């Protein structure tokens, strides 16, 4: 076999192998993002211009999250937050709107204690999505109801629902969601 014939066989074979490797790498990355972000993956893809743009956004979230110093809470602080949550739940009986607002503030305080930045709601969602994508919809729903309640437009049932939704994220953050990590040194 001549060198030319060998090159005619080897070059296309190498191209095919490279294309298969790239496709496999993209598939594996997409699968990893779906597993990590859960429902947040689909939400981001739906709101983005393309799947690739959404995946870039999710990767950027991961990179930002890796720079945060997310830490577990010491036992005494966990106990204090649990006690404060109980107080907020008891407050609901007499002052449901105030309780929902206090629940929002308590969740935000807990985020901050864990190491999440809390300056802007949209950024909170992005930062939380990396490790808490499965409970993030609870936070969105509760926050929407809290916004309604500030204008006295939420029903008692909506307020009760908000408390349930806040509790889902609160409990996950309080227990570290089983995934507390530290930023690299």
Image: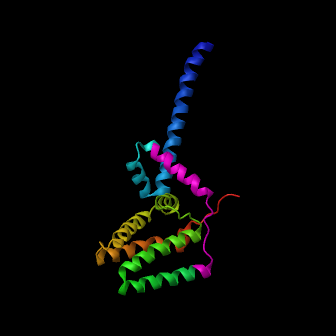
Residue drawn at (46%, 42%) of the image: 52
Residue 11 position by quadrant? top right
Q: Nearer the viewer, residue 89 or 129?
A: 89
Q: Nearer the viewer, residue 53 or 97?
A: 97
Vertical placement of residue 6 versus 136, above or below: above
Residue 1: tell me if it is visible: no
Tell me which segment is drawn in magenta: 53-77
Residue 33: tell me if it is visible: yes
Vertical placement of residue 87 versus 30, above or below: below
The spot of residue 97 in percent (x, y) is 36, 78
Residue 7 position by quadrant? top right
Q: Residue furthest front?
A: 151
Does the magenta-highlighted stretch encompass residue 65? Answer: yes
| Image quarter hosting the C terminus | bottom right
Residue drawn at (59%, 13%) of the image: 4
Q: Main secondary structure of the magenta part?
A: helix
Side of 67 relative to 151 (left or right): right
The spot of residue 34 in percent (x, y) is 46, 53
Does the magenta-highlighted stretch encompass residue 59? Answer: yes
Residue drawn at (30%, 78%) of the image: 156
Vertical placement of residue 28 versus 4, above or below: below
Q: Nearer the viewer, residue 85 or 146?
A: 146
Q: How many marks?
A: 0
Q: Residue furthest right?
A: 185
Residue drawn at (46%, 84%) of the image: 86
The spot of residue 2 in percent (x, y) is 61, 12
Side of 152 relative to 72 (left or right): left
Side of 67 relative to 135 (left or right): right
| Image quarter hosting the N terminus | top right
Side of 165 relative to 71 (left or right): left
């Amino acid at each position: 076999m001549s060198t030319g014939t060998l090159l005619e066989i080897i070059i296309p074979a190498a191209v095919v192998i490279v294309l298969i490797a790239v496709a496999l790498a993209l598939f594996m990355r997409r699968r990893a993002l779906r597993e990590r972000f859960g429902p947040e993956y689909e939400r981001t893809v739906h709101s983005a211009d393309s799947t690739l743009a959404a995946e870039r956004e999710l990767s950027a979230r991961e990179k930002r999250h890796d720079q945060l110093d997310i830490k577990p809470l010491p036992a005494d602080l966990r106990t204090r937050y649990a006690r404060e949550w109980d107080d907020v739940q008891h407050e609901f009986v007499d002052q449901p709107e105030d309780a929902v607002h206090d629940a929002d503030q308590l969740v935000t305080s807990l985020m901050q204690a864990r190491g999440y930045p809390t300056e802007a709601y949209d950024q909170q969602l992005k930062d939380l999505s990396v490790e808490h994508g499965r409970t993030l919809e609870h936070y969105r729903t509760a926050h929407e109801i809290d916004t309604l309640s500030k204008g006295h437009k939420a029903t008692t049932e909506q307020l009760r629902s908000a408390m349930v939704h806040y509790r889902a994220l609160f409990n996950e953050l309080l227990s570290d969601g089983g995934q507390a990590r530290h930023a690299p040194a």
